[in-house]
């Protein structure tokens, strides 16, 4: 059998990860079997095991993909003309733009991390990477005099994680949760934590949310 080209291998691997994400979000980590993932991806067990030997391997692959996605979204935020608007855009990409299944999968992996040490190590490594990235960002902004935070950068980074985790969890479990309408208030809250007033764009969205005239306007539209 001819060897698959690298681009084809990468595409197949991503396709399998997409299938695993859907299965974990729909059925949970324990109820999902490798056979379920094969069926979702329309691949044979032999093809699946070329890339992933276990469900833990799949979680590691999903975690690494999410870490890479975070880095792509996070790059350049410190140099953005309006870093508060850049933060708002990242928040919207996660809590409004991403499909709900991703939030449910993250919640499922977080719970499994308390029971499965292998999953726990994977989960904590990604969590620490994100926290460290924000901590370093806040340290830089503070040194440059661009924020006047009420708390040290490590505390700020953890507080931001708590806010983000709350948004993620609520969206995962509450079908009526309207993350878009809440985002302007979240941006305001984060700005208060950083000692940074809202940007004009974020302030406009906040006013719209209060009056109900444009509660669902994407924050990235205001950034254009």
Image (tube, rainbow, N blue to C red):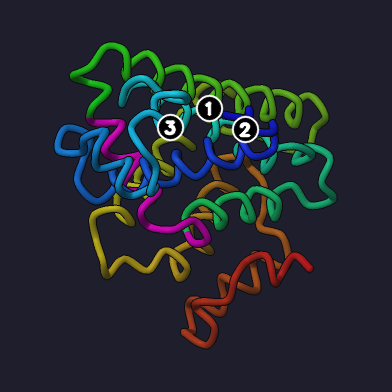
Circle 1 residues within 10 Å: few <14, some 14–19, many ≥20 = some
Position of 199 with respect to 193 (left or right) is right
- Of 129 and 11, the residue lying toward us: 11
Whichever of labels 2 and 3 marks the residue nearer the N terminus, that label is 3
Whichever of labels 3 and 1 marks the residue nearer the N terminus, that label is 3
Pointer 2 and pointer 1: residues touching (CB < 8 Å)?
A: yes
Pointer 2 and pointer 3: residues touching (CB < 8 Å)?
A: no
Q: Which residue is mark 2?
A: 68
Compared to residue 164, the image places residue 200 above or below, namely below
Among all residues in the image, which is located at the extreme bottom? 213
The secondary structure type at the circle numbered 3 is helix
Alpha carbon distance from label 3 to label 1:
21 Å
Residue 1: x %, y % from top left: 56, 29
Location of residue 65 by image quarter: top right
Alpha carbon distance from label 2 to label 3:
24 Å
Residue 127: x %, y % from top left: 46, 25
Q: Which residue is mark 1?
A: 64
The secondary structure type at the circle numbered 1 is helix
Circle 2 residues within 10 Å: few <14, some 14–19, many ≥20 = few
Q: Which residue is mark 3?
A: 47
Residue 36: x %, y % from top left: 24, 42
Which residue is painted at 62% across and 54% down in the image? Answer: 88
Q: Which residues are magenta?
A: 96-111
Pointer 3 and pointer 1: residues touching (CB < 8 Å)?
A: no
The secondary structure type at the circle numbered 2 is helix
């Amino acid at each position: 059998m001819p060897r698959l080209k690298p681009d084809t291998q990468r595409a197949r691997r991503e396709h399998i990860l997409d299938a695993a994400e859907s299965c974990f979000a729909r059925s949970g980590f324990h109820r999902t079997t490798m056979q379920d993932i094969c069926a979702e991806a329309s691949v044979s067990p032999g093809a699946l095991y070329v890339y992933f030997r276990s469900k833990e391997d799949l979680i590691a692959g999903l975690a690494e993909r999410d870490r890479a996605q975070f880095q792509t979204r996070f790059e350049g935020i410190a140099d953005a003309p309006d870093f508060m608007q850049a933060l708002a855009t990242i928040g919207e990409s996660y809590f409004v733009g991403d499909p709900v299944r991703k939030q449910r999968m993250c919640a499922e992996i977080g719970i499994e991390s308390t029971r499965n040490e292998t999953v726990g190590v994977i989960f904590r490594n990604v969590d620490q990477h994100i926290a460290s990235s924000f901590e370093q960002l806040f340290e830089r902004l503070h040194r440059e005099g661009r924020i006047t935070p009420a708390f040290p950068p490590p505390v700020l980074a953890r507080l931001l994680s708590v806010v983000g985790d709350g948004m993620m969890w609520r969206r995962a479990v509450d079908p009526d949760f309207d993350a878009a309408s809440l985002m302007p208030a979240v941006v305001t809250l984060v700005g208060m934590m950083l000692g940074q007033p809202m940007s004009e764009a974020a302030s406009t969205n906040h006013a719209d949310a209060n009056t109900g005239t444009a509660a669902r306007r994407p924050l990235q539209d205001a950034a254009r």
